[in-house]
Image: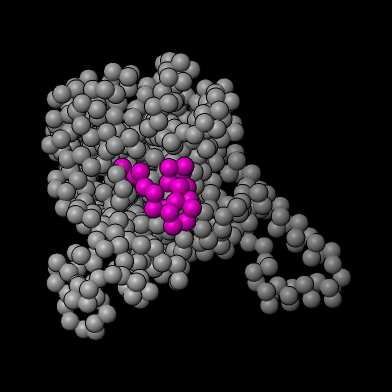
Amino acid sequence: MELVCPAGNIDKLGYAYAYGADTAYIGLKRFSLRIKADNFYEDEYKRVIELKKKYPQKRLFCALNIAFHNHDLKMFLQNLDYFKQYPIDAFIVQDLGIVPILQKEFPGTHLHLSTQASCMNKEAVKMYHSLGFKRVVLGREVSLDEIREIKDACPEMELECFAHGAMCIAYSGRCLMSAYLTGRSAQSGFCSHSCRWEYDLGVSREQLAGSSCAKDSPLAKLNAEGGVISAEAAKEIAQSGILRLQERQRPGELFPVFEGDDFTAILSSKDLCMIDHLADMKKAGVDAIKVEGRMKSTYYVAMVARAYRKALDALEGKISAEEAAPFIASLDDVAHRESTTGFYYNRGDADKTTIGASDSPYLLAASIGNAFSDEECENVFKTGEKLLADRNAELEAMHPAAREAALRDLEQHPEKKIKIAAKKEGWKLYPYNALNRVDSGTELEFVSPSVLAKKVAGSEYDFINPKTGELLDWVNADHDCAIYTAVPVEEDTLVRVKDPDYREGEIRDRGR
């Protein structure tokens, strides 16, 4: 099975490929259902082309999965020349109006039906095949048995199914809740993830007082204190329309909630995780498994891609199950919520809800580039030596009283002293792209496509400013930094550190 992973920006695209994705899917500005992802724009197509050259066997899909309005179509047509510069292998669409345009303007590019179209039966799949679609990303509501029936009925159609990530409460993400509560439409790419918020359920006294129910009606029992309402009465209350939700960060804003025979209008679903059931997906006829998450972090994309790559390699006999097991278990190190198998086995599994945001015990500290050449490394040390020599010469040239004052100041403020790195046998220098603050001496962990996690003690590395040759006591985003170490560093290595604020079993409120 093909592994299809998300890429919200160019850096994530590179890590998706490096950590095991066969294919990555991206969105272009204004035409993707993940507007808040960085998406791709301006001249980034040049970097995408270079990545495709580096990974010639990898594919690139483009999500054009918004519901197009007339002005969207006009804007898309105005940007055709720009889109044609991307090496796109397939477009993922839900709106049939864009299909003839793509078929005309991109004749060699495949068409894939988005899960937003909620395609869930064999006759629909046959119809989309007749329209020229190469692949259908099935609605998340299909079971494995239904997938098998669909594949048997239309074997020439490729079937892609979600295997990991967030699920929506609405049919395949066609949700109006965000637009209703915040004015931010999920169908235009602005989903606020309202279903993940925390709500209090109640009923306003005004609503109850205005009801025409008799005093012995189950609804009237809400006025009574204590006691237990029967299941029948609770159902009548839920279906009456008088219940109201209040989001905890929006006191005073009451939203009606209605329960029907087989649904409740507002729920927070568990995340999908099928990594232990890939054999069943393959047996059902799934051609490609998909990971959700173009708005997720680089760390998330890399770790999830790696875990599913190892699981698929084990399924295909390329590695043993024992070799894959620790990488699969490392999914717990990634920000995640409670998981479920969704609709694949039992509708009841998908109906189970949860609360809280996702959380992780780690912070992504940095990414590491390819090693400096011997000449570049030598220049860094020479620059540091010159800096120190110039400083010493400056002190020597001072008036004795001024020099004494300067030296006294350095004693009182040792952080002002110039500290340069010393050359060490067997150590190498690498670009260090800091993403979060890390103090020198902190234990680091290197993770890479083939290295599960290598702990690096504070004594096993130095932070160096490659422009000045100075040792650094700490680094942060946008600082010029390199890491000097004897620990082997594989290409595309990421650096993580323990999050000191993480508490197991507690989900922190990150705001919204």
Q: Is residue 438 visible?
A: yes
Quarter of image, res 356: bottom left
Residue 125 in the image: x percent, y percent? 24, 26
Image-based side of 254 in relation to 470, left or right = left
**Quadrant location of the N terminus in the rendered image:** top left
Residue 493 in the image: x percent, y percent? 42, 45
* Colour scheme in use: one colour
Residue 52 in the image: x percent, y percent? 45, 27
Q: Disc count in the image?
A: 0
Q: Residue at x 35, y 43 (%)?
A: 174
Quarter of image, res 344: top left
The region drawn magenta spans 172-190
* Outermost residue to the bottom: 225
Seen in the picture, residue 213 relative to 154 is either above or below; the reply is below
Seen in the picture, residue 57 relative to 141 is either above or below; the reply is above
Residue 224 in the image: x percent, y percent? 24, 82
Magenta span includes 459 = no
Quarter of image, res 310: top left
Image-based side of 460 in relation to 112, left or right = right
Q: Is residue 325 visible?
A: no
Q: Residue at x 71, y 55 (%)?
A: 387
**Residue 320 or residue 440, whichever sits in front:** 320
Magenta span includes 175 = yes
**Residue 93 or residue 420, whichever sits in front:** 93
Q: Residue at x 36, y 66 (%)?
A: 245
Image-based side of 397 in relation to 346, left or right = right
Seen in the picture, residue 307 relative to 261 is either above or below; the reply is above
**Residue 337 or residue 33, whichever sits in front:** 33
